[in-house]
Amino acid sequence: MGKTGPVYVPAYAKLTLSLRVVGLRSDGYHLIDAEMVSIHLADFLTFSAGDGLEVVGPAAHDVPAADGNLVRRALAAVGRKAHVELEKHIPAGSGLGGGSADAAAVLRWAGCDDLGVATSLGADVPFCLVGGRARVRGVGETVEPLEFEERQFTLLTPPFSVSTAAVYGAWDALGAPVSEGSNDLEPAALVVEPSLAEWRERLAQETGAPVHLAGSGATWFVEGAFPGADRVVVTTVAPG
């Protein structure tokens, strides 16, 4: 880096198009069978000489730069040091895998394609490292690439986050329901944060399209381009 200058790496968000919870491991982690795609909503990481993390950008609020940040954890996992400027655009707690995408960007910068290392950092990190379109199983460690499809989606993210752990806990408490829609976690997410329903109805009324929950929430999405207030239109991103 000292001779070549800073290195700039995008970290693309992931969108979970479908999610089934298919089991529970003895350690309490849930097993899933999901389809995920990378989308053109991204954080940007700039690596330069030094040691430190600076978080900037429109979605930087509520993103600590302390040791628990996934960027720092990923650097430690690969035994590397750098000064990283993390420009946040993916809202935290939105179900779009922002922290996982950031960690995967660190691994990519370090030349690490080990899914075991990725899994040690978080369930969504393996997919974010592979990218594109994939079937994701287990606790996220099994990533089966699928043929890329160019698609557009419109996202609506409420101004609050939803805890993934709380949603899985609510799913257990509800008796492991199978959703009529594409995401088994939707009923549990609505229990954890009832106001999500208002945002779902808003997107449905404004687009007339079927609305889906992204992962454990809080983002809702529809397929197709419906630009408008508070909505973000994204396209899928091919791997590599």
Image (cartoon, rainbow, N blue to C red):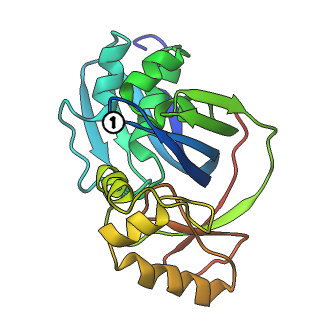
Residue drawn where x is 40% and y is 12% of the image:
2
Front in this rendered view, residue 141 or 187:
187
Within 10 Å of the Cα at label 1, are there few (<14), some (14-19), or many (20+) other Cα atoms? few
Is 164 or 107 nearer to us in this picture? 164
Residue 240 in view? no
Image height of 29 relative to 113, above or below? below
x then y, percent, for residue 6: 44, 24
Q: Which residue is situated farthest in the bottom direction here?
A: 205
- What's the residue at 48%, 65% (across, down)? 186
Q: Identify which amino acid the numbered label 1 is placed on.
A: Gly
User: Is residue 212 placed above or below 116 in the rendered structure?
Assistant: below
Q: Nearer the viewer, residue 17 or 112?
A: 17
Q: Tell me the residue at 34%/20% (across/down).
A: 75
Q: Identify the residue position indicated by label 1 in the image.
A: 28
Looking at the rendered image, the quarter that the N terminus falls into is top left
Residue 29 visible? The answer is yes
Question: Height in image: 80 above or below 32?
Answer: above
- Where, by quadrant of the figure, is residue 30 drawn? top left
- Residue 149, image x, y percentages: 81, 48
